[in-house]
Structures are given as C-alpha cells and as structure tokens.
Image (cartoon, rainbow, N blue to C red):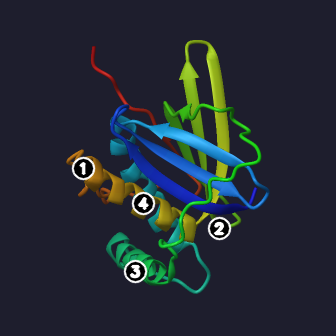
C-alpha cells in the first residue's frame, strides 16, 4: 500500500479524531481515535520516531538527548517541505475496512528493519477483532504526529503539549498502546 494523502479532523459530535488516509491505488482507510488512545499514542509514536530517525544511515547520536535534537531538526526540515495546503482528495474508489471508520481500541508499534514504523490499529469489540497494518516511513510519522497535534489544539482537548517521555525503546521493541478505562 502506497499512502498518497493523510488527513486528521475532529468530529465535535463524537468528540473523536477521524484519521483518513488514501492510497495511490484509490483505497481509503478511516480510523476513529479517542482522547484516551491519543493521550497514550502520541508519546509512544514520538519515542518510536526518535529510534527510527536514529537508525537512519549516516546519523549518529551518543545519547537520548542528542537523538531528540536530531529528531527535532528532522521534523523541522520535514515541516518546511511538507504540503499541508493541498486539500484531501475524498474521491474514494474502495473502502477496504468498510463504510464506517475503525474505532481504534489498541495500537501496536514496532520498528521495522526497512526503516519504517509499523502501526497496527485494532478494533476489539467483544469477540470481534478487526485490524489494519500500516508501514510509515519517518516523514509520514512526522506528518501524522503534526496533524494530530494540530487537531488536539482545535479540539481543545488540553493535550496539545503531549510530548514523549525520555524512555527509549530497545531496538525493534514492540510498544503496545491500550487506553485504560475506569469504571
């Protein structure tokens, strides 16, 4: 799957983020992200992105702080060249996950040997499990995080400053993001 465009919007009625991505093959994938999931997902993605950027050829950083600085430089370089002005093309030919967005209840993140970050979005409702695997290169991860943070601010979720913690993942370690709910 070759991702062509990515969009993140806030649905005020559902109070969720709607992530849409379309492919060069004319498929559109839609995902609902809840506040609780985003609260855990963005720090985990930030952490994974630092590891992903540090694994790029020609980049060497002696410590986590230096890795974060290099990541910040890469993010700024990406944001300077990214196209956020072109409207999202919603002429969809196929919806492989169905007409309704997948309500993401779990996310698994893992660094891949090809220099990408694999995200597995899962919807677990009762016994039914539906999932979608996405492989994002660093530029798309930067773009995804940037768009989510923009929507956090617009949604007034008071999480716009959500940042990563300084813990780092071991190489190729799988991070699991599951929001905890209190009853």
Q: Residue furthest front?
A: 91
Disc 3 to disc 2, C-alpha distance? 19 Å
Q: Earlier in the sequence, mark 1 or mark 4?
A: 4
Q: Which mark is residue 76?
A: 3
> Residue 157's quadrant in the figure?
top left
Question: For numbered disc 4, what is the local secondary structure?
Answer: helix
Q: Earlier in the sequence, mark 1 or mark 3?
A: 3
Disc 1 to disc 3, C-alpha distance? 21 Å
- Comparing 124 with 3, the one in front is 3
| 166 shown above or below 84 | above
Q: Earlier in the sequence, mark 2 or mark 4?
A: 2
Instruction: Tell me what residue is drawn at x 63 percent, y 17 percent.
Output: 128
Q: Nearer the viewer, mark 3 or mark 2?
A: 3
Q: Nearer the viewer, mark 4 or mark 3?
A: 4
Q: Nearer the viewer, mark 1 or mark 4?
A: 4
* Circle 4 residue: 147
Disc 4 to disc 3, C-alpha distance? 14 Å
Instruction: Tell me what residue is drawn at x 27 percent, y 19 percent.
Output: 182
Q: Earlier in the sequence, mark 4 or mark 3?
A: 3
Q: Nearer the viewer, mark 2 or mark 4?
A: 4
Question: For numbered disc 1, what is the local secondary structure?
Answer: loop
* Circle 1 residue: 159
Q: Residue furthest right?
A: 25
> Residue 99's quadrant in the figure?
top right
Give the left or right position of residue 40, taking residue 142 as reference. Answer: left
Question: For numbered disc 2, what is the local secondary structure?
Answer: loop
Disc 1 to disc 4, C-alpha distance? 13 Å
Callout 4 environment at 10 Å: few (<14), some (14 to 19), or many (20+)?
some
Give the left or right position of residue 160, taking residue 46 as reference. Answer: left
Instruction: Provide residue 149's location: percent of width, then percent of height.
Output: 34, 58
């Amino acid at each position: 799957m070759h991702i062509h465009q990515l969009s993140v919007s806030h649905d005020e009625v559902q109070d969720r983020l709607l992530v849409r991505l379309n492919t060069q093959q004319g498929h559109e994938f839609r995902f609902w992200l809840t506040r609780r999931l985003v609260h855990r997902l963005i720090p985990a993605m930030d952490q994974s992105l630092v590891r992903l950027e540090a694994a790029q050829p020609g980049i060497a950083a002696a410590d986590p702080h230096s890795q974060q600085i290099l990541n910040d430089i890469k993010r700024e370089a990406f944001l300077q060249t990214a196209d956020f002005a072109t409207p999202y093309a919603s002429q969809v030919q196929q919806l492989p996950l169905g007409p309704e967005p997948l309500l993401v209840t779990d996310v698994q993140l893992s660094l891949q040997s090809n220099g990408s970050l694999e995200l597995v979005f899962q919807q677990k409702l009762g016994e039914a499990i539906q999932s979608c695997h996405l492989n994002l290169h660093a530029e798309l991860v930067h773009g995804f995080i940037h768009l989510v943070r923009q929507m956090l601010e617009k949604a007034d979720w008071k999480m716009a400053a959500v940042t990563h913690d300084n813990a780092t993942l071991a190489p190729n370690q799988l991070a699991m993001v599951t929001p905890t709910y209190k009853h």
